[in-house]
Image (cartoon, rainbow, N blue to C red):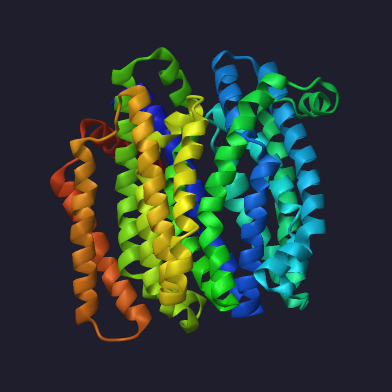
Amino acid sequence: MSDQAAREARGVSISLLTLVAQASMPAFHVMLSRGLGPSPYGLYAWSNMVVEMLSVITLLGMDLAVTRETSVAVADGDDDRVERAVAQGLRVVLLSGVAVAALLAVGAPAIASWAGKPDVVGPLRALIAVPIAYHAATMFLLATNARLAMHYDFWTRGLFQPLTLLAVTALALHLNLGIVGACVAVATGMGLTAVMASVFYGREFSLSKTLRHALTAPTDTALLRAGLPLVAMNLVAALRGRIDAFWLLRYGTEADVGAYNACMLYAVSLFQIRSAFYPVIGARLPGLLESGDRAALREFLARQVRWVALLATPVFVLFAGLGDGLLAIFGRGFLYAVPALAWLALGQFFSALSLPVYVLPLGRRAHLSTLSATVAIALQLVVPRVLIPRWGLAGAAFSFALALIVAESLALVFSWRITKVHALSWGLLKPLIAGAGAWAAARGVQSLVHGGVAVRFFAGAGAGAVVYLALVALLGFDEVERGLVRDGLGRVRAAIDRRRA
């Protein structure tokens, strides 16, 4: 096993720990749905989608622009350049965030009028500070991730953020502050998270110098030029991911939007598995693209996609085959959304395996990502308006999956034409075959077990997990994976020996 693969694996493993820790976020939404009720929760979810979409403008492409700049600076050992890049990113997201917040505060009644839901005005205005705080935290964490110090991201986004949101929102619900109070609590939790991210940033770089740069340094026009083209790409992608929910509120009910959001909370974790690989991708891919070494680029991408598939396939089986047990956590009134969860999971699973699309934004071809997403949006302007009145929630989920698969397929074609490199390998088939076997086993056991939703869910999930692990082991690992398994087992044995001593 190469040293580089080992470093990548360590970075990804910490990012995955962050993702596992963030599994508490559905608990936050379960608490909201049960504390507020299905309809108010649906209004919260819809308002949050609007704010998240507009937050792309707040970000102004600084995520990828600062990622590129800090990655190169860390490789050169230039901490001052890192601090200047983070300072510029902070300045942009704070100034643009205030401007967008003001526009949203003024435009909230018009948005509510379009949706025909006057009660969303309060939640929209209460959530306007969330993007500012979230993106400020992102600027700090991008720099620490570039140094492969992923543990700061774990402590901040994996533990502190979800636990803080749970605590402050539980307090708001306990005080009967209603939906607006819950939204204010969310904004407070995000603000505290930004503070925590700045503290951890200060352990690797100079926080005081960064803040001085943000206040006094001249504007880095080159960084702005790098970020601005990404605004359209991110805005189109955000609209693509939420337009179905907008139509759903127009043609359905607040409860439908709440159920759709519950499904998306689960399904999006498939994409988050891919996102867990992004810190390593952001640290290595720009350099590989600059070097022009196709063999190294293909090996890197194929390895990352194979690892994503190993982790994402059993999660997809869980969501697509055993959705009733997951949605029952929100309440029995959410069980009608099981087909919607399956469709959303399919779209997100395809997206998770489409990791090579990062070639476009990190290779300064963001306009091709924008074009791919625009084609998908054209579908979403038509398909949901036909399917939602007929199929309801399932129609919205199907249109989302269709648009996502179309967009990612186009982006994959563009990335291949640019690099002449793909990420397919025979090793990729192994988790897919194992997943098919796990799905058959889980469904078969469920059909044989009698009892409530929980009993059938755990029986099916247990059978699926056993079959998946057995088939993956039977089909065999590649040499790199075997090395990682040996290394992991060695660490476990060493830890056991130390405890015995």
Residue at position x 51%, y 73% in the image: 259
In the image, 210: left or right of 454?
right
Q: From this viewpoint, is residue 497 visible?
A: no
Q: Is residue 392 above or below residue 94?
A: below
Residue at position x 23%, y 48% in the image: 431
Residue 334 x, y percent position in the rendering:
47, 78
In the image, 174: left or right of 323?
right
Residue at position x 58%, y 71% in the image: 249
Quadrant the C terminus occupies: top left
Question: In the displayed image of the protein, which residue is found farthest to the left?
Answer: 474
Q: From this viewpoint, is residue 454 visible?
A: yes
Residue 188, picture quadrant: bottom right
Quadrant the N terminus occupies: top left
Closer to the camera, 347 or 248?
A: 248
Residue at position x 73%, y 74% in the image: 119
* Number of marks present in the image shown: 0
Residue 43, picture quadrant: bottom right
Residue 133 x, y percent position in the rendering:
73, 47
Question: In the displayed image of the protein, which residue is found farthest to the right?
Answer: 216
Question: In the displayed image of the protein, which residue is found farthest to the bottom?
Answer: 451
Closer to the camera, 141 or 378?
A: 378
Residue 282 x, y percent position in the rendering:
49, 30
Residue 367 x, y percent position in the rendering:
51, 32
In the image, 108: left or right of 48?
right
